[in-house]
Image (cartoon, grey):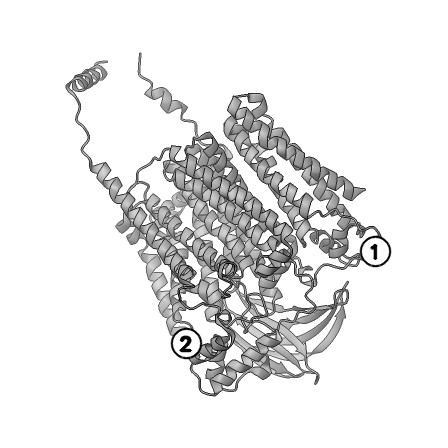
Amino acid sequence: MRRVFLLVFALLLSAPAFSWAAVQPDEMLQDQVLEARARALSQQLRCMVCQNESIDESDAPLAHDLRVLVRERLKAGDSDAQVLDFLVARYGEFVLLKPRLSWRTAILWGLPPGLLFCGITVLVVAATRRRVRVQEPVASLTSAEQARLKKILADSRSP
Amino acid sequence: MIAELGHYALTLALGLALIQGTMPIVGTKTNDPVLMSMAAPTALAQFAFVAMAFTALAICYVISDFSVLNVFENSNSQMPFIYRLTSIWGNHEGSMMLWVSILTFFGALVAVFGNNLPAVLKANALAVQAWIAAAFHLFILTTSNPFVRIPQAPFEGQDLNPILQDPGLAFHPPLLYLGYVGFSIAFSFAIAALLEGRIDAAWARWVRPWVLGAWMCLTVGIAGGSYWAYYTLGWGGFWFWDPVENASLMPWLAGTALLHSAVVMEKRGALKVWTILLAILTFSLSLIGTFLVRSGVLTSVHTFATDPMRGVFILAILVVFIGGALALYGWRAPLLKQGGLFAPISREGALVFNNLFLTTACASVFIGTLYPLALEALTGAKISVGPPFFNATFGPLFIPLMVVMPFGPLMGWKRGDLFGAAQRLLAAAILAALVMVAALAIEQGGPVLAPLGAGVAVFVMAGAVTDIAERTLVLRLPFRAALRRAIGLPRSAWGTAFAHFGLGATLLGIVAATAWGSERIAEMKVGDNLDIAHYRLTFDGLFSRQGPNYRDMVGRFIVHRLNGDLIGIMEPSRRSFPTRNMTTTEAALMTRGVSQIYLSLGDPMPNGNVSVRLYFKPQVLLIWLGAAIMFAGGALSLSDRRLRVGAPQPAKSKAALRPAG
């Protein structure tokens, strides 16, 4: 939907050619396990010349190079973390679609759980306060009110 | 001449909007019924002029008047009629025209159907609606005028971007805008209530149908866009957590929360202040969405800086309306009286839970979408926030919400019986557990969370069925009696069940299609076979076909079941458009039940082979069918007696309570 949305809204009308094939048959590794790992890693890596596209989806030449690079590192025996570290060292944090937790991203990662926690706290406090208020003894009737109540009840009984 | 008429009509609409935005408010302050009653006719007149402007633009497109710059840039006389029409909103200026057309259309609807509204509320709400309209009229006239002429008219237009030459363009943007802009009604009513400093349960009853209508349109608008992307992009993705998608998801999440909190307000008079805030936030998110996609800020912070006029204008609209609304809220909201006590375990409690999780989910989408922009603007550091982030934050918030969802409708107002509700949901829970176990057993190797997701989805769907079964007593009464109860059930109860069932179906589709689908990427020569799931595809050859303004290179594939039965033929193609020198991929889809086989062609190889991408997407259609069911639920709820003939007047009970003598 990305491209459709972008085209509907942002109207990047100057794009010269579109082709949708991302991973090409000739890029793929023979080893099924390694290839599966490569695909999973590719989905976490950003194609830096595209808009919010992973290298797994993009058909830009850079994405192709990165896909080949990831596969080369995997064939050389790198672990997933090592491949990611290698790419971050080369291209910076920008390459990761899921930013790492750091001071810079503290608000990003902290906001959703923080907000949930605050919301729950507010609701619990409100609920306990309300319960206290509900449990407060209702002031009993004054003698004048008692008398009036008796009169009303007596009136309603008589036809 | 027609373009000039349109331009003139739009200018007049701006003038009318200014009148509509001021006079009724003066009327409410000076208690002048004549000034207040100006709101409705000016709203109608404003709509008439905007409609005239839109029609003028439409005529320019239909007759292919290439002396109008906007038509020249986005249309072509060779295009089929339907695309000449839809290309009106396939560009920035035209889509803003659609935006204001829908906005003033809603204003006119309030003017026409708002006879039962209190005069002050109606006058204020229409005035606020007019402020929004005036801001956007001014935006169009100063920065995005679609009626600009070219001195030397060219013979032929530049054509609409081929990706947009799709039936999807006819439905997706209008529905999305109906949703976005529909929420402006809730916003206007909220501001009107704040201006007046008075709000009651009746407010929720007036506002809820508008919110519901907008929510329905937004639901199918988003789902439609998702299906469009699914069949257009050539690899079967349906949701990418792209900022432009998030821009439409955020109002949906906030709008869903608003829909539910408005129920509490209508039925129980509680959550008033919160509902007002949600109404403001929902439309604010629609405005932010418009800003995000219209200003170019998404492409890069720098694009925004190089062509700042439009972006700065929309940013100013944003600051004035959102800032102003929130300031007014901070000032006036304490005046509004709270009411309606309830225990934490109750239907209200469940709806508060719903609101907490929906708004938190919305906030996580918001921060994920805007954080990279803010960080780059403030520190210059570039980071990416993509699907892995959203899956990690949005998923954990949505799953608890779905688990609690079936409990809500089964609980009583004020004080609910959690144990009783759990007992009644036992069958649904057992069914869900069975599905989880079956999924674990059959689909070994998929993601660990997938069986859990499928179980939750089934729980939600079965919970919705339980809700109806409990209300109609279908398992305890004879069938006829139950049927009578089912017919007598309020349609809003049916609406709830449908909408919840639909959401469960959508979740099931998402889980199944992402976790248990299969993919084959291969290079094929004529006669080659490729197997996927229970099917075998044979490549039969390539041929070419001429369309009205494009040329197709079609691959022909014969589909068999693995046991040899012939099922059909799939013909994916690559479509080239000479006017723009662009090629698009037209995938072929074959529907089997609610699952699909998905086939798309890559670039042809020099040796005459083709590279193909073949997918099996189990249960994928449930994603969009679920949205359709949600829409149906909304429609049922809209047709509820309460809204058709109005709530019963409490006249009798008042008379009974009057002290005798």
Q: Residues within 10 Å of mark 1 (few under 14, many from 20)?
A: some
Residue under the point 49% across and 53% down: B250
Q: Mark 1 or 2 closer to N-term? A: 1
User: Given the image, on which type of amino acid does mark 2 rest?
Assistant: Gly
Name the residue furthest top.
B661
The image position of residue B422, as x and y in percent, is: 29, 53
Q: Residues within 10 Å of mark 2 (few under 14, many from 20)?
A: few
The image position of residue B478, as x and y in percent, is: 37, 46
Q: Chain of mark 1?
A: B
Q: CA distance from mark 1 to mark 2?
A: 60 Å
Label annotation for residue A45: none
Q: Which residue is mark 1?
A: B154
Which residue is at the front of the view, B351 or A77?
A77
The image position of residue A117, as x and y in percent, is: 33, 54
User: Given the image, on which type of amino acid does mark 1 rest?
Assistant: Pro
Q: Chain of mark 2?
A: B
Q: Which residue is mark 2?
A: B445
The image position of residue B628, as x and y in percent, is: 53, 53
Using residue B341 as the reference point, say whether residue B124 is left or right of it.
right
Q: Circle 1 sits in a helix, a strand or a loop, which is it?
A: loop
Tag in front: 1 or 2: 1
Which residue is at the front of the view, B27 or B632?
B27
Residue A85's place in the image compared with B331, above or below, is below
Mark yes or no: residue B639 visible. Answer: no
Image quadrant where one finds the N terminus of chain A = bottom right
Callouts 1 and 2 on one subunit: yes
Which residue is at the front of the view, B454 or B63?
B63
Mark yes or no: residue B96 visible. Answer: yes
Residue B427's place in the image compared with B276, above or below, is below
Which picture quadrant has residue A153? top left
Residue under the point 49% across and 36% down: B191
